[in-house]
Image (cartoon, grey):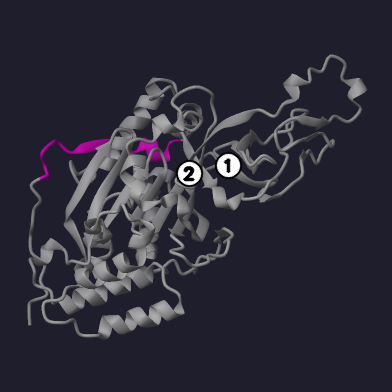
Amino acid sequence: MKQDKLEPVTNPEWGQTPYQQVDVARYVSPEHVRLECEHLWPHAWQMACRAEEIPEPGDYFEFEIGDQSLLITRTPAGAIKAFFNACLHRGTQLAKGCGNKVNFTCPFHGWSWSLDGENRHVLDIADFPGLDEEDLRLPQAQVGLWGGFVFVKLTEGGPSLEEYLPPVPEHLAPYNIDEFRIRFWRSTVIKCNWKAALEAFEETYHTLGTHPQIMKGMDDIGVVYENLGIHSRMIVTNAVPSARYRGNVEEQEVLAVSIAGLLDFGLADEAERAALEEMAKTPLAEGQTTRDVFRAMSYDRLSPFMPKLPVDQFLKVYHYTIFPNLAFNLMPGTLLGLFARPNGADPDSCIFDAICLQHPAGQDMPRVEREFITDPDFDWGVVMAQDVSNLERIQKGMHARSMKTTRLASYQEKRIANRAQVIDEYYRRGGESS
């Protein structure tokens, strides 16, 4: 029996540049909330929803960022538009939440607009001499589509979405993400800054301290970290033990730990769960590895739907961050997304979305509504719960009088430093960033 022992290891990429420091005021200061609302959020492209959430004319979804509210809607011609959610009379919000409307009518005085943003009614218009019909069109934000996601940008000008996203679309084209459908979408409020919420998932440096139970099914040492301009990614190898064990793990245990990780994310129905649990107990053939089992299981089912995806990518997890606030783990057929944004003007809380998208792979997937989670005992799964449990403690710790800066590893936390540097560039240019 091989020893279950962790040993010191290193990665040749570590320590090639000095460690980075980030001012904690970015996470706790109302002034930084103001700076972001003025210089970041109006000028950066942001994911607002999935196109599948507004499939029919008149379907709408309210997207909120900071103190701004947009109505994302599908027009009778099938186009997607994003209107600022304010009546041009006295500012009343036209709609809340999501639903379907023939037009947008103000609940205060009854002014109304078509789904194309043209004014349809002004009560007692004779009492508004000189009112310009063109001035009554609902103002719009920019809209762009990629991978089935609807992105919005609150200001005019700047890079188009096609100019903003590279190189992410090119990297991910073989996955056919536009064909994915929502498996679940859960939103909640977490008591930490939106940046801290995302950063908890943008490195594997925390795995040993936070998720020791998954160490035998994921290599946290050989992770590749890359900054891609304003975006970033890391590439993780799963279904192998951490290099910290130096091979001192039985393959059968790697299989059991890897399957437990899949089940923990809630990606299996009851029949699939039973089959995977049985697989975990079934002895591997001589020389067979967990990667062999997972590759065959994934490749056989999904390769017909993503034929351009190389076979070696069927066992790698690509974690991307699209600046500023959309991060996701991407595996063949599955996207686990994390989306965080300010909760109003409070630097100490954020709206946090956990998203699971899956490729239908020839099966019917019913339309799924978002859930807003308020139950403090909600079962997020072990791994997610471990991460979330750290976040409030991170935020409270940053308020310590002694805490002036964070200290980031030069390689393993380079993605976190990159976001701070890009935000600085938005500040410097007053929002005009390429």
Where does label 1 land, which residue? 64
Q: Is residue 127 magenta?
A: no
Cα distance between the residues tagged 2 and 1: 9 Å
Residue at x 56%, y 61% (from the top left corner): 374
* Most foreground residue, 169 or 417: 169
> Circle 2 sits on which residue?
341
Residue 88: x and y in percent read 74, 28
Q: Is residue 152 above or below residue 286?
A: above
Q: Quadrant of residue 287?
A: bottom left
Q: Which mark is residue 212?
A: none
Residue 402 visible, this orientation: no
Q: Is residue 333 left or right of residue 120?
A: left
Q: Is residue 205 left or right of residue 386?
A: left
Q: Quadrant of the N terminus?
A: bottom left
Extreme residue toward the top, this view: 130
Secondary structure under the numbered disc 2 in the rendered image: strand
Q: Is residue 376 left or right of residue 338?
A: right
Circles 2 and 1, Cβ within 8 Å, touching? The answer is yes
On the image, the x and y values in percent for residue 154 come to: 55, 30
Tag 2: amino acid: Arg
Query: Front-most of 262 and 393?
Result: 262
Q: What residue range appears in magenta?
A: 13-29
357 sits left or right of 91 in the view: left
Looking at the rendered structure, the kind of residue marked 1 is Glu
